[in-house]
C-alpha cells in the first residue's frame, strides 16, 4: 500500500511554461484535493474532487486546472507558470472531506 | 467562509514542559475541527479531530484538544513535551457545508533540552 504518491519531488520551470503535477492514491478514496503551502500562509485549497468526473474550485484556483478521470489519479496542471506559483504543492485523499486526509510527500515548484 | 486563527507562529517549550497551541475559529454552523502535524520535509498527518459528541478529544502521541463552543476555541495540549514533538501544527475547520477544510497559518513548536 503506497498511500498517496506525488511526482516529481522537485521541479524548476521558466515563466510561461506548462507542466502537470501528478498525484495517485491506492486506497480507493473518493475525495482528493490539492493544496499549496507558502511560508506564513498555511495550506490553501486549490481544487478538489469528490469522485471520478467531479471537480470543484477551492480558495485559490486561478492558474490551475484539474480533471479526475479515474478514482486513483488527480493531476494538477499549470497552463502558463508564473513566479507567484512558486510553492510546495500537496495532494491529499480521504474517504470524505471530514474524514482523515492522507497527504502525499509534496512537490516543490520553483518558477523563474 | 470559515476562518481559523492560530495564535503565535512559533511556540518554544522545554522538554518535559506543558505544550499549549491555541486555535480559534469562526463558523456559522456546528464545526468539525482538526489538528494536523507536519514534520520537516513531509506531508501533514492527522493528530485528532472533533466532529460531534465528547468535547475533549484524545489524539496520537499524547496530544488532546478541547472543543469550547462558547469560546470558539480548539486548543491543543500535551502535558509533557518531547524532543520528537518539534514540528509545525495546523488547526483546520470544516467549510462550505462540510465539503472543504480551511487551515490556519500554522504554529511551529520548538522543543529545547
Image (cartoon, coloured by chain):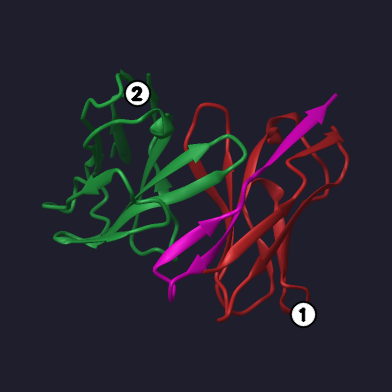
- The residue singled out by tag 2 in the image is A9
**Quarter placement of the C terminus of chain B:** top right
Q: How many marks?
A: 2
Q: Main secondary structure of the magenta part?
A: strand
**Whole-percent x, y for residue B11 in the image:** 80, 39
> Residue B70: which disc?
1
**Whole-percent x, y for residue A74 in the image:** 22, 46
Magenta stretch: give its range: B91-113
Residue in the image at 58% along x and 43% along y = A41
Display colour for chain A: green
Left or right: residue A69 versus residue B99 is left
Left or right: residue B100 versus residue A76 is right
**Whole-percent x, y for residue B104 in the image:** 61, 53
As drawn, A96 above or below A15: below
Mark 1 crowd level (few <14, some 14–19, many ≥20, 10 Å Cα): few
Mark 2 crowd level (few <14, some 14–19, many ≥20, 10 Å Cα): some
Display colour for chain B: red
Between B39 and A64, the one lying in front of the other is A64
Q: Chain of mark 1?
A: B
Residue in the image at 66% along x and 76% along y = B54
Based on the displayed image, in which of its 4 quarters is residue B16 positioned?
top right
Based on the displayed image, in which of its 4 quarters is residue B73 positioned?
bottom right
Q: Is residue A106 visible?
A: no
Asked whether residue B8 is drawn in magenta, I would say no
Residue in the image at 42% along x and 56% along y = A59
Q: Is residue B2 visible?
A: yes
**Whole-percent x, y for residue A22 in the image:** 23, 35
Q: Chain of mark 2?
A: A
Asked whether residue B96 is drawn in magenta, I would say yes
Amino acid at each position: 500500500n503506497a498511500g498517496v504518491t506525488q511526482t516529481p519531488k522537485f521541479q524548476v520551470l521558466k515563466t510561461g511554461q506548462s507542466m502537470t503535477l501528478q498525484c495517485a492514491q491506492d486506497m480507493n478514496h473518493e475525495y482528493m484535493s490539492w493544496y499549496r503551502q507558502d511560508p506564513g500562509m498555511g495550506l490553501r485549497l486549490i481544487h478538489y474532487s469528490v469522485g471520478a468526473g467531479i471537480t470543484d474550485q477551492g480558495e485559490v484556483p486561478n492558474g490551475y486546472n484539474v480533471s479526475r478521470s479515474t478514482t486513483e489519479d488527480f493531476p494538477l496542471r499549470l497552463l502558463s507558470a508564473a513566479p507567484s506559483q512558486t510553492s510546495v504543492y500537496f495532494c491529499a485523499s480521504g474517504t470524505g472531506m471530514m474524514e482523515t486526509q492522507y497527504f502525499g510527500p509534496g512537490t516543490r515548484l520553483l518558477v523563474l | 467562509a470559515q476562518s481559523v486563527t492560530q495564535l503565535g507562529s512559533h511556540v518554544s517549550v522545554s522538554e518535559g514542559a506543558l505544550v499549549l497551541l491555541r486555535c480559534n475559529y469562526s463558523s456559522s454552523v456546528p464545526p468539525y475541527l482538526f489538528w494536523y502535524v507536519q514534520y520537516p520535509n513531509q506531508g501533514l498527518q492527522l493528530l485528532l479531530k472533533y466532529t460531534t459528541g465528547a468535547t475533549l478529544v484524545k489524539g496520537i502521541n499524547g496530544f488532546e484538544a478541547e472543543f469550547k463552543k462558547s469560546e470558539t476555541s480548539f486548543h491543543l495540549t500535551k502535558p509533557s513535551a518531547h524532543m520528537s514533538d518539534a514540528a509545525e501544527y495546523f488547526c483546520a475547520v470544516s467549510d462550505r457545508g462540510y465539503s472543504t477544510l480551511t487551515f490556519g497559518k500554522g504554529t511551529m513548536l520548538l522543543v529545547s533540552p
